[in-house]
Amino acid sequence: MDSFQLDQIDSLRLLRCSPLLAAGFEHAFSTRRGGVSPLPAESLHLGETEQDGEASRSLVRENRRRFLGSLGLSDWPLRLIRQVHSATVEIVTEPGVSPVEPPPIADAVATRLPGILLGVQAADCLPLLLADRVTGAVAAVHAGWRGTVGLIVARTLEVMQRSFGTHPSDVLVALGPAIGPCCFEVGPEVAARFEAIDPLTRTHLLSAPTQEGKARLDLNLANLHQLRQAGVREDHVYDCKYCTVCHNDLFFSYRFERGTERPVGRHLAVIGRRQTGPHHRLLQR
């Protein structure tokens, strides 16, 4: 958490990773503070859910305007995806997008273009932001347990290698707020899925079973393990260590709030870079 800063900008509170800022990458993980959505009040709901009607969507548009304005990026296109807990990676090659065009179905989005923001939404699942210090390529990843089993972050790095010439050792990774192992209980069928992809899962990713016979799953550690295996340096991975359930006053949590009468909001995790120049310090390999 020492690598993260919780900034107050106007009425908003935003979480940002200091090493990514120092390397010149624009990014942020939103919190639930400082918006206009009644969840329960003045909430910064930034995503899209099946529960949202037109009135809610208009509030989301205002929340996004505030969010991008707080970052000084109001004129940057925001490229989102329709998340389905898959291992599909979308590559952005053109900055523009029609406002009526449905977003592509994927759970990660990557680009090398400057001047646009890539985003994923979450409310317990793990958002990861990837930044290549040499090529300037960036990616936003949504990793729930299904995406983690599907190796979504490893596949994102493969796409960045193939499409942009990224070397994993050059990549900085910020892990945003997500449900922690303190609160994430899963049944034996989910534990078995993790053990099937890695025989070491039982000792490295799952803590002792609970009294109900379930296991506690550490999404952050599972994705860190995949990043290491893919060649990302461990000292280039920064974990904010915020559990969305334990810190529900600051973050939305679907698992914690789903039994309430009101809809559950969504955060955005966004990343992009400016044109190469004095505000962006790309390294030479």
Image (tube, rainbow, N blue to C red):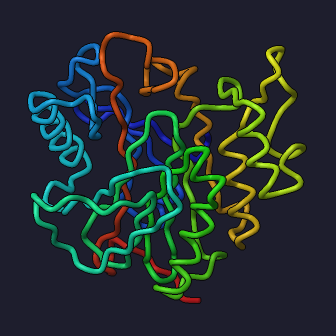
Quadrant for the N terminus, please: top right
Question: How many labels sit on residues?
Answer: 0
Quarter holding residue 232: bottom right
Residue 232 lies, with reference to residue 179, above or below; the image says below
Asked if residue 76 lies left or right of residue 87, the reply is left
User: Can residue 21 be seen in this snapshot?
Assistant: no
Residue at image location 65% in from the left, 62% down from the top: 236
Asked if residue 259 lies left or right of residue 148, the reply is left
Please state which of residues 245 and 7 is positioned toward the viewer in this rendering. Answer: 245
Residue at image location 38% in from the left, 74% down from the top: 91
Residue 53 lies, with reference to residue 157, above or below; the image says above
Residue at image location 56% in from the left, 49% down from the top: 175
User: Can residue 6 be seen in this snapshot?
Assistant: yes
Outermost residue toward the top?
261
Quadrant for the C terminus, please: bottom right
Q: Position of residue 277 (x, y in %)?
A: 32, 80
Q: Position of residue 257 (x, y in %)?
A: 44, 17
Q: Position of residue 170 (x, y in %)?
A: 60, 76
Residue at image location 83% in from the left, 33% down from the top: 207
Please state which of residues 201 and 190 is positioned toward the viewer in this rendering. Answer: 190
Residue 278 lies, with reference to residue 152, above or below; the image says below
Residue 200 lies, with reference to residue 160, above or below; the image says above
Asked if residue 161 lies left or right of residue 62, the reply is right
Please state which of residues 126 and 5 is positioned toward the viewer in this rendering. Answer: 126
Please state which of residues 285 and 51 is positioned toward the viewer in this rendering. Answer: 51
